[in-house]
Amino acid sequence: MRAFEDATVEAVFNAYPQQFRKALLALREIIFEVAAETEGVGPLSEVLKWSQPSYLTEKTGSGTTVRLDRFGDSSVAVFFHCQTTLVETFRELFPELKYEKNRAIVLDPVKALPADVLAICIKMALTYKLKRK
């Protein structure tokens, strides 16, 4: 597991009940792996936005913010900026996933994460602004 650089972000992860924490930490790893493997993304900043762990491409400006959080009583979610076309595109590409309006992919924390599909979605978010230049 990648070490936390910000104690407040780490504290948020530690405050989640175990079933949510495990899935959210796995999502965090996918985000950092995708960023490291994707040309143009550069290093990520991990901060809290709206009290949620958030991942920004501040140095390169290549993408839009990706956020993680618990969703309702039994799910976790990967949130994307609602004014992008990302979730609309994900729906077309991956109709098997569960979505919340135009802002999130909703996941069952006790089931295996669809890591390959999520990696594609996260890559699209972290490079979203590159497509607009």
Image (cartoon, rainbow, N blue to C red):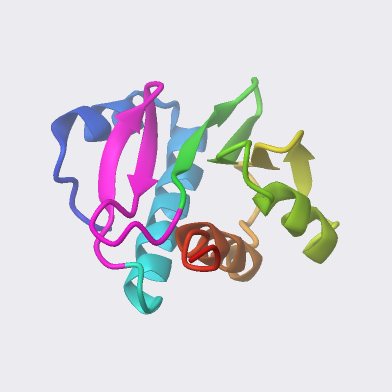
Q: Is residue 54 left or right of residue 92?
A: left
Which of the pair 112/80 is nearer the observer?
80
* Image quadrant occupied by the N terminus: bottom left
**Horizontal and vertical percent for residue 62?**
39, 62
**Which residue is depicted at the point 48% across and 59% down?**
129
Q: How many marks?
A: 0
Which of the pair 32/82 is nearer the observer?
82
Residue 75 sits above or below residue 40 on the image = above
Q: Is residue 93 left or right of residue 104?
A: right
Residue 57 sits above or below residue 76 on the image = below
**Which residue is depicted at the point 65% across and 21% down?**
72
**Which residue is depicted at the point 43% across and 37% down?**
21
**Which residue is depicted at the point 47% across and 67% down?**
130
Furthest residue in direction front, as rendered: 133
**Horizontal and vertical percent for residue 42?**
27, 67
Q: Is residue 99 left or right of residue 1?
A: right
**Horizontal and vertical percent for residue 57?**
33, 55
Q: Quadrant of residue 70?
A: top right
Q: Check if residue 53 falls in the magenta segment.
A: yes
- The magenta segment is 42-63
Residue 106 sits above or below residue 95 on the image = above
Q: Quadrant of residue 80?
A: top right
Q: Check if residue 13 falls in the magenta segment.
A: no
